Image: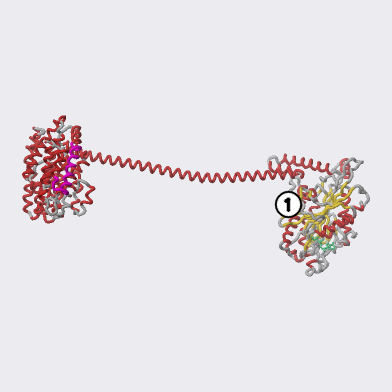
Amino acid sequence: MDPPTGAAASPPAPTTLRRNPPRSARPPPTPLPCVKSKPALSRLLDDAASATIPPPERLKVFLRIRPLPERGCGKAKASRKPKQPGLVCLVASGANSVALTVPHSKLVDPKRGRTEVFDGFSAVFSPDSSQHDVFTQVMNPLVDEFLGGKSGLLVALGPTGSGKTHTVFGTPRNPGLLPLTLRQIFKGSSKGVTVIQPTRSFCLSMFEILSEGKGERILDLLSDASDLVLQQSTIKGLKEVFIENVADAESLVSCGMLKRSTAATNANSKSSRSQCIITIRAVHESADVESGKSLSNPVLTIADLAGAERERRTGNQGTRLLESNFINNTSMVFGLCLRSLLEHQKNKKKPLEKHFKNSMLTRYLRDYLEGRKKMTLILNVKPGDDDYLDTSFLLRQASPYMKIKYTNLEDSSDLVSQKRTNVSLICQENKKKRKVHKAEVVTVARKDDIDKDDDIKIAERDESRYKFHTSELQRISRSEEIMKNFANCQGFMDCFKAVQKLLESENAAESITKLLRDKDIKIMELEKKLKGLSYCSCKEIPTVDDTSVEQKDDVSSDQPARKFVSLSNQTDLGSSDSGLNNFHLAVEEVSEEFTCHVPERSSVYSDMTGEYAVGDTSVINLINEELSSEDSKSEKACNSDAFGPERNVEKEITEIAIQAVDKTLARSESCPGGGGVAHASSDLDHPSDQSFTENHVLTCLQSERTNLSPQFIGGSKKSPIEQCEEMEELHNITVEGIQHNVDTREVKCHSSPSYSQQVNSDAVDVSSSQSSLQLEGMGAVQQNPEDLDPQSGDPQSETCEPTVEITIVEHGSIQPPHLVNDHVAMHPCMLNGKSSTTEAPIVPTMGSQAERLPDETKDISPSKTCNRNNTRRRLRPVSAMMLKEFTGPDIYADTKREERVKPSSDATGRSDRLIRLLKDM
Ligand SMILES: Nc1ncnc2c1ncn2[C@@H]1O[C@H](COP(=O)(O)OP(=O)(O)OP(=O)(O)O)[C@@H](O)[C@H]1O
């Protein structure tokens, strides 16, 4: 055995001055006796108590200083030089203390050295201490307790290359603590106090915890089995080999050491890469018969931890570096557990942290790390200056562990009862914790599970809680997603609703707009009707105006004459009173219109400007003169007879108009532009023009008969209802008949020269015989085959004149043929010298049908289009007049309306006169 280490074996004292006293190396001051303060009785009791109750056992911490490495040790053989005395930083200053001196290379101020004394160790072994010395002081107490039935643990700590493996295992020549322990076990108690029962056997197991990537694994060093599983503090599947003698045991250990993971580093040629744990379990084959108690199975555990490594020193890379991390982490966790235990013992309020969970080693050694079993630490340090940091770190870290006390050591004699006691103690402690931390339900619940037997339940509970929280988190995240989607959908729905509302509002706006348009249209129609009514009420005979305008359309420059003609019609159909008034208004209107048209005509007909202006003005003057002279007569006649004088006024007005027009024409014939008459007649030569004119007139009648009716009837002084009925019947019948006749004639004019017979037959079918005669006469005159152009087949210009004349005369008065000629000649188209037969029919039809105008008047000068708007509605009364003149007697032939027919008899008379005129022509 090695000689016990002592002060003689320690290196020489450092030469550096101790400027700073050691912190905790000094023993605590002995309390001074206070005789006066305590009575004698109490002092006696204290002494007795101190004598009977030993102080609580503390954690034993031994310090072994390895000798300086020799030259050529490991990979660092070349780099390491033999240490010279005085180059060490750590020396044993006492049996229980060491002095750590800061090397000069580490000093900030080289002149100022600094030495730290670490005291309180159970023993300090100098570099020259033998293995036996270490075993005697470190391992014998543990072996004795083990053999006495108590479990114990020895852990070798220290940086790499500090001699841990050497201390534990040693060499064949210089065996370490484990071989010595085995020898001691089989030898028996060193002191001979306790004799091991022959019935007890021992089992040896050996395994290592090494890193596997970033994890850990347990490897059985005594078997070839696969990885072991750590459950609580028990390793499942660990092989335990019964050892019967020291040789077998040492053989097993030797085999295990061969399997241990080691590697060469810059710090150690055979550096341990794993935590190696050897357990010796004592197995009692029979119970203690005398005591009647089942003997416990103590376990003696020896752990050779891998030393902490500094990367700079080791130069590890790759796998070695991972191993270094694992080693350092395990060492750190081990130290944290001890520190936590120490803190907890110092301050009970501080919870015992569960750092043991962070590594397999600490989990396996939980009972020891939590102070329930005895543990002994042996710190291996290197004294060289180069190892100052490692040494200093270990001393600073592990020196406080010696303060750890064992107050709740388990009864090794009865493991079952000890376990129950432990459980009860832990439960009591947990109850206290529950009372203190009632509010912290979760933490308290977790603290309730300190009992190691409940670890499975804790794990299951944690797992269930984890699953529950995971499911809750998933549910919450799903709910959040749903809410987000719903929010998006809600926003989309809001947008959609807003769009729908917009569409609805747009639709409503459109419908309202349509309604407004309809209302506007209705309002405009009503306004038109109102204007028409007001116009009728003002002039009493609206047809007069229409007639006059129609003539104005035909010949714009002949408006004064047409006014008179219309006025004659008006007086013929209207009342005498209103007729006179309207006559004045018409005269004024004629004068105004004439004045307004003068520039237009002058611009268009430049060669006729002066004459026409003079002629028209003279006509107006003549009309005014005649009106002024005849005004008084008309008023008297109107007052005397409601209907009779109307005829007189009509005749008078007609005569006045004829006279005025005659005068005008007489003047115009004398002018150079008078040739326009013949020219105009030539434009109307074509029979189709006649038919076209009539056709348009009838078309106007069809389209505007509702408007014509009140106007037309308004002049007959009938009740509104009667007038409406009469006019409706009149137009419904006459329009169809005349339309048919005119269409027939139009066709006949272009197709066959014998069309007159057909026309006659149609006329007989539709209208009365009288009207048929008129139509026949017209047709005979218009479409006499003899009058047709021999070349083109078209009727010559002369044949058209009566037709035009008839049209004008039928308006209410008999007019001389020259008036008609003049009427036609005044048409701008004629005056422009356009002799095209296709343009001639435009004269009466320009305003009758707006739809035909664009096609039919493309070649018409702009001056012609100026009057189109006015000519539209002013042809209607003319047609109406014609209808009344030609069809009135036939329509009113009904016996029930004999009285109504009476007024039409006058028209019949006029028709007769018209026919006679035609015949005369
Ligand atoms: N007290 C001692 N007397 C003689 N040699 C020693 C002593 N301590 C250690 N050694 C030698 O130092 C070298 C390293 O020792 P050891 O392998 O035991 O260190 P270690 O702390 O186990 O290192 P690691 O943690 O890397 O395994 C070994 O060759 C060993 O023989």
Going by the image, does 724 lie left or right of 445?
left
Q: Which residue is mark 1?
A: 358
* Element assignment for label 1: helix
Judged from the image, the quadrant occupied by ligand 1 is bottom right
Nearest the camera: 905 or 188? Answer: 905
Q: How is the image coloured?
A: secondary structure
Query: Magenta segment range?
Result: 730-755
- Residue 572 in the magenta stretch? The answer is no
- Residue 749 in the magenta stretch? The answer is yes
**What secondary structure predominates along the stretch shown in magenta?**
helix
User: Residue 56: horizontal and vertical position, in percent?
Assistant: 84, 47
Furthest-right residue in this view: 192
Q: Tell me if residue 60 can be seen.
A: no
Check disc 1 and give the amino acid type.
Asn
Q: The N terminus appears in which quarter of the rendering?
A: bottom right
Nearest the camera: 358 or 334? Answer: 358
User: Residue 622: horizontal and vertical position, in percent?
Assistant: 7, 45
At x 36% / y 43%, what residue is drawn?
Answer: 510
At x 70% / y 40%, what residue is drawn?
Answer: 438
User: Residue 168: horizontal and vertical position, in percent?
Assistant: 84, 57
Nearest the camera: 817 or 203? Answer: 817
Q: Is residue 392 above or below residue 466?
A: below
Nearest the camera: 94 or 871? Answer: 871
User: Residue 221: horizontal and vertical position, in percent?
Assistant: 81, 56
Q: Residues within 10 Å of mark 1 (few under 14, many from 20)?
A: some
